[in-house]
Amino acid sequence: MLVLRRNAGESFRVGDNVEVRILDVGRGRVKIGVIAPREIEIYRTELAEMNRRAVVEDWRGSGLSDLAGKLRPSPPNEP
Amino acid sequence: MLLPAEDELPADGVIEFPEGLPGLPDQRRFVLLQPEGLEPLVVLASLDDQRVSLAAVQARAVWEEYRVALDDDDWETLGSTADDHARLLCLAVVILASSGAAATCNLFAPIVIDPETRRGKQVVQLGSDYPMLHPLGGVGSGGGPEEDARDAGAA
């Protein structure tokens, strides 16, 4: 992994078309601006992780039907 | 907005995700299933890898006032225009409960599908405060500060 040290207000480039700017540095938190062509999707790493965690290998398994049952409003004549 | 029943799907009911999905870039063709007994959940089953399916729930079913924001690129990917907004399906990807953690759905990045053009895209809702991990079973409401934003007119 390449490691860079940058101050607030400075930036770096990823290739010719992507610029990453450090806008503000707080305590343990940074604000980052990205300038990139529209066709480059920018998303938090967590989203990719979240999609992978969401993968169901067998949707006929019990996990989904159990959850579906909890999400359905129970009929009024049931206890 | 009602989901088409499975038998109403066109014979070639394949939904194409031209950009793939973050984290699952190789999955570009899915079918949308509404298996009996799984309502209100739907299943997006990948045609590129049979071991990959995603469960989802309509965003409006878990967040009454949910509104998805789409930009020009999103419309281009979907092959439709803002006039077609009403027919879009907006699905929140579900993560099943595991080891003590409750089941959640992702309202920050819903999967938007146009049933007419049969194209889909996962659309990150930058500038919204919709949660990525919305616990299933409760109904949320809006409000709260903006976290991320896209400058108007910026690249």
Image: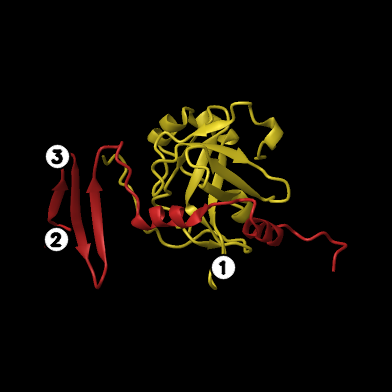
Chain colours: A red, B yellow
Q: Residue B136: x and y, percent?
A: 60, 62
* Residue ID for mark 2: A3
Could you tell which of marks 3 and 2 lies nearer the N-terminus?
2
As helix, strand or loop, the secondary structure at mark 2 comes to loop
As helix, strand or loop, the secondary structure at mark 3 comes to loop
State which quarter of the image contains the C terminus of chain B.
top left
| Closer mark to the observer between disc 3 and disc 2 | 2
Q: How busy is the neighbourhood of tag 2: few (under 14 within 10 Å), some, or many (20 plus)?
A: few
- Front-most of residues A12 and A33: A12
* Residue ID for mark 1: B102
Label 2 and label 1 in one chain? no
Is label 3 in contact with label 2 (beta carbons under 8 Å)? no
- Vertical arrangement, residue B120 with respect to residue B107, above or below: above
* Residue ID for mark 3: A16
Q: The residue under label 1 is which amino acid type?
A: Ala
Is label 2 in contact with label 1 (beta carbons under 8 Å)? no
Q: Mark 3 lies on which chain?
A: A
Q: Distance between the residues labelled 3 and 2?
A: 19 Å
Q: How busy is the neighbourhood of tag 1: few (under 14 within 10 Å), some, or many (20 plus)?
A: some
Q: The residue under label 3 is which amino acid type?
A: Asp
Q: Which chain carries label 1?
A: B
